[in-house]
Amino acid sequence: MSAMSPTPSSPSAAPDATSSVDPVWAELYEEIADCPRCPLARTRSRTVPGVGPAHADVMFIGEAPGAREDERGVPFVGPAGQFLDELLAGIGLTREAVYIANVVKCRPPANRDPEPSEIEACASYLDRQIATVDPKVVVTLGRFSMARWFAGQTISRIHGQPKRIDGRVIVPMYHPAAALHNGSLRAVIAADFARLPEFIAEVRS
Ligand code: URA
């Protein structure tokens, strides 16, 4: 493994936005880097477009960058990302094999929830990422990405339950950060993750 692709379980050594990016993303990431569409453009340090290959069977969609992500320009490199890396490793996946993005590409001040207008302003970027990656399985992490496919639902009710929508399997899951606030969710999230290989194998066959 090169210095540009550190082990997933060591977020302190995680890549930043200058690490090698598949050329397919160049235009979109540059557009996002210059994005003026919402007020988050005035408070961000860096945009956090997404990370991963041009195509992947599995795509994870979180909420919005936090402080560490805002510094590095890469999603899920803080404490929640460390837990995500552990969860991926637990099912034999690495960051390099999946695509990871957020609903909103810029950090909301003080990590507040993204506003509906900010989610809307960013929506076409996520549309383009999904269209390019063309994942067979989409894992939504937390309620904001869940709402894109499961409007009006609550995560406590539907987490871990896959649904086939528009030719993809969408699996709503708790956000990994939820386990940092409520330790009992750790086992719940790990159990939901443990079923992912089964869902991936089903759509591959
Ligand atoms: N939480 C998210 O939803 N995304 C990140 O990139 C980091 C934390």
Image (tube, rainbow, N blue to C red):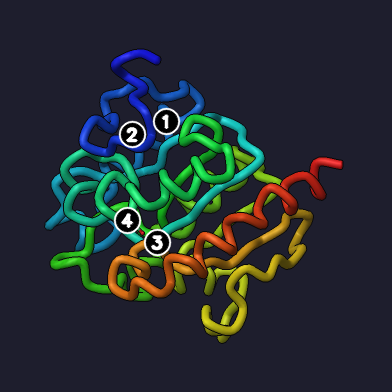
Q: Which label sits in the foreground, 2 or 3?
A: 3
* Residue denoted by label 2: 30
| Viewer-nearest of discs 1 and 3 | 3
Nearest the eye: 30 or 178: 178
Disc 2 marks a residue whose amino acid type is Glu
Q: Give above or below for 46 relative to 144.
A: above
- Amino acid at pointer 3: Pro
Q: Toward the viewer: 38 or 192? A: 192
Badge 3, how many Cα within 10 Å: few under 14, some, many 20+? many
Which residue occupies the foreground of this view, 200 or 119?
Answer: 200
Q: Residues within 10 Å of mark 1 (few under 14, many from 20)?
A: few
SS type, badge 2: helix
As measured in the structure, the alpha-carbon distance from the residue carrying label 2 to the one carrying label 3 is 28 Å
Q: Badges 3 and 4: C-beta atoms under 8 Å apart?
A: yes
Is the Cβ of the residue at disc 2 closer than 8 Å to that at disc 1? yes
Question: Quadrant holding ligand 1?
Answer: bottom left
Q: Is residue 193 visible?
A: yes
